[in-house]
Amino acid sequence: MHGQTVLYIACEFGDANMVKRLLEIGADPNKYCRSHESAYKIFSRTRTPLIVACLNQRIECMRLLIADPRTNLNLIDKETNKTALQVLQDQFPQLVSKYIEFTKKRDTSTNKM
């Protein structure tokens, strides 16, 4: 758990209630954290909570992060140089429509302010 925020871990494990609460109290949805795919890898800060939620197919966590206007949807996974949407397009194309649906709802609510 070294180098990972509580928000990152909640997204990784799909704890949407925790994600919601952490965002409510001001957790940074754009903070890069260390991935831990290999015990032998030299860790660097490579992923955001949104990217890890996408990689783990945590749909409700994705929705909560995308709905938060602080979340930068254009940050990249530093291992693949891809945004969360591009990660989904490559690995989980069945989830792309959900991602787009969530971003449309975000755009609608942002325009009302």
Image: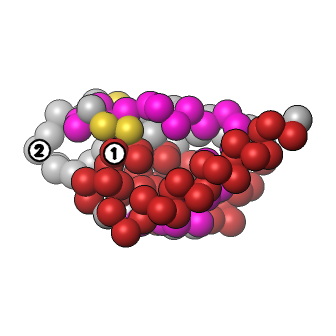
Across and down, in percent, residue 24 comes to 78, 47
Q: Note whether 102 is above or below 107 in the view shown.
A: below
Across and down, in percent, residue 22 comes to 69, 49
**Disc 1 residue type (three-letter):** Gln
Residue that appears at 53% across and 54% down: 100
Kindly state the secondary structure of the residue where label 2 is placed: loop
19 in magenta = no
User: Counting residues from the N terminus, which is met first, the one under dot 1 or under dot 2?
Assistant: 2
74 in magenta = yes
Range drawn in magenta: 57-80
- Real-space Cα distance between discs 1 and 2? 27 Å
| Closer-to-camera residue (93/84) | 93
Residue that appears at 87% across and 40% down: 112
Residue that appears at 34% across and 45% down: 86
Horizontal side of 32 relative to 18 (left or right) equals left
Horizontal side of 27 relative to 44 (left or right) equals right
Q: Residues within 10 Å of mark 2 (few under 14, many from 20)?
A: few
Across and down, in percent, residue 14 comes to 51, 66
Residue 36 seen by the camera:
yes
**Disc 2 residue type (three-letter):** Tyr
Q: Note whether 68 is above or below 28 in the view shown.
A: below
Q: Residue furthest left?
A: 40
The mark lying in front, picked from 1 and 2, is 1
Kindly state the secondary structure of the residue where label 1 is placed: helix
Q: Residues within 10 Å of mark 1 (few under 14, many from 20)?
A: some
Instruction: Please name the residue that numbered disc 2 is placed on.
Output: 40
Q: Specify the quadrant that holds the C terminus.
A: top right
Q: Which mark is residue 86?
A: 1
| Closer-to-camera residue (13/75) | 75
